[in-house]
Amino acid sequence: MNEPIRTQWQIRCAFNGYCKRALQNEMLAAKRDIKRRQRREVTFSDLTSQEEKQLFVCDQYFTDDEAEKSFVIAGKEITAKLLAEALHSLPEEKREAVLLYYFFDMSDVEIAKLHNIPRSTVQYRRTSSFELLKRYLEEHAYDENDW
């Protein structure tokens, strides 16, 4: 016995029914997962202070002088504190050009637009700052052999 040929309409209805059933099953599975997760979840207001402290970590960078990181270049010890002092020794406009360029990844053109000055002025401030930084670090850095 041959099965009667299904019409396009019947095939479409069967496929729609299959899709609807699949979507319903997915919805039920999602609801079940959400309920399972909600049973295990705890709101922040329900946590004890001990449990709250386990949720975060505080970094302790440069809290004491012994822990301060340094590096030695050409026999001179350079510390983060010394580098910060060297940057603070620069005139404000030069310091700002250096910080914006190297720490905020701004181009000379962007810095020039920000301050309404020519791009060449920004480049001069930035490059001339290196000579000042170099002199400051040479004068104030500790020799490795001085220890």
Image: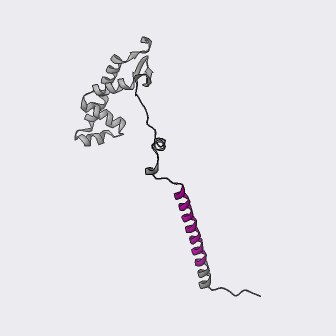
Q: Nearer the viewer, residue 10 or 56?
A: 56
- Single out the residue that lies furthest toward the left: 116
Q: Magenta stretch mostly in which secondary structure?
A: helix
Q: Residue at x 30, y 42 (%)?
A: 110
* Quadrant in the rendering for residue 91: top left
Vertical relation: 114 (above or below) 84: below
Q: Nearer the viewer, residue 26 or 104?
A: 26
Q: Is residue 92 left or right of residue 1?
A: left
List x then y, in percent, for residue 13. Answer: 59, 81
List x then y, in percent, for residue 69. Answer: 44, 25
Is residue 52 rendered magenta in the image? no
Q: Residue at x 36, y 25 (%)?
A: 81
Per the rendered image, the range of residues in magenta is 16-40
Q: Is residue 39 left or right of residue 49?
A: right
* Quadrant in the rendering for residue 123: top left
List x then y, in percent, for residue 57. Answer: 46, 38
Q: Residue at x 43, y 51 (%)?
A: 45
Vertical relation: 42 (above or below) 92: below
